[in-house]
Image (tube, helix red, strand yellow):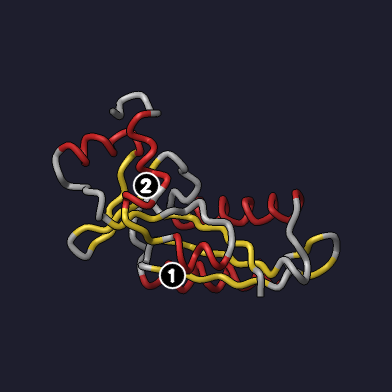
């Protein structure tokens, strides 16, 4: 199955009740999700109590403008219902000491300069766009991630 993937990073860990609610509402939404009046074969998953992952089989029905808009509307409804931030693309997640931390992208250089983040720190590349990327490029050392290029390109980073 060649699947398109969307990853939504929560600003905090989800509670067990929130995970149950998110998955229940997600399965309900996906059960009616369509692209040009064709059902989208899709699934939802939660990883590390922090990331909502939606996969869609593009060979069956590839989501386009309106169906992607519908999925974003669904994610916004989760944000409102569960008091979450899921659409913030100005922060990044990384793993340290067995925990996942979230920082503003503008703090990356500071964390590198203090040694809290190194080239070997695992970061989450939420920009992967397909199932293969999710499996092979989502959790990678900083040195292998696009985040590393931010050092010279973002004000506040050197």
Between 72 and 143, the residue placed more toward the observer is 143
* Among the two numbered marks 1 and 2 on one chain, the one whose residue lies closer to the N terminus: 1
- The quarter of the rendered structure image containing the C terminus is top left
Q: Position of residue 13 (x, y in %)?
A: 34, 61
Q: Position of residue 60 (x, y in %)?
A: 77, 71
Q: Looking at the rendered structure, which numbered label has been put on residue 141?
A: none
Q: Residue furthest right?
A: 37
Q: Looking at the rendered structure, which numbered label has been put on residue 92?
A: 2
- The residue depicted at 14 percent of the width and 39 percent of the height is 114
Note whether 28 is above or below 7 in the view shown.
below
Note whether 34 is above or below 144 in the view shown.
below
User: From the viewer's perspective, is 76 left or right of 65?
Assistant: left
Between 30 and 98, the residue placed more toward the observer is 98
Between 65 and 108, the residue placed more toward the observer is 108
- The residue depicted at 30 percent of the width and 44 percent of the height is 103
For the residues labelled 1 and 2, the Cα–Cα distance comes to 21 Å
Q: Residue furthest front?
A: 144
Q: Are marks 1 and 2 in contact (CB under 8 Å)?
A: no
- The quarter of the rendered structure image containing the N terminus is bottom right
Please tell me whether mark 1 sits on a helix, a strand or a loop: helix
Q: Position of residue 153 (x, y in %)?
A: 40, 28
Q: Looking at the rendered structure, which numbered label has been put on residue 19?
A: 1
Note whether 52 is above or below 104 in the view shown.
below
Q: Position of residue 131 (x, y in %)?
A: 56, 67
Report crowding for label 2: few under 14, some 14 to 19, many 20 or more residues within 10 A (C-alpha): many
Mark 1 or mark 2, which is nearer to you?
2
- Residue 12 placement: quadrant: bottom left
- The residue depicted at 39 percent of the width and 38 percent of the height is 149
């Amino acid at each position: 199955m060649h699947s398109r993937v969307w990853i939504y990073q929560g600003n905090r860990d989800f509670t067990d009740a929130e995970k149950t609610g998110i998955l229940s509402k997600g399965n309900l939404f996906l059960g009616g999700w369509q692209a040009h009046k064709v059902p989208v074969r899709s699934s939802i998953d939660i990883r590390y109590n922090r990331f909502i992952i939606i996969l869609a089989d593009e060979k069956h029905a590839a989501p386009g403008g309106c169906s992607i808009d519908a999925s974003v509307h669904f994610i916004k409804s989760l944000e409102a219902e569960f008091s979450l931030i899921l659409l913030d693309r100005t922060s990044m997640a990384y793993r340290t000491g067995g925990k996942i931390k979230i920082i503003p992208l503008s703090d990356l250089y500071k964390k590198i300069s203090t040694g809290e983040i190194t080239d070997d720190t695992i970061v989450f590349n939420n920009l992967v766009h397909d199932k293969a990327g999710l499996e092979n490029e989502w959790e990678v050392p900083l040195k292998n991630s696009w985040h590393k290029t931010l050092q010279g390109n973002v004000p506040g980073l050197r």
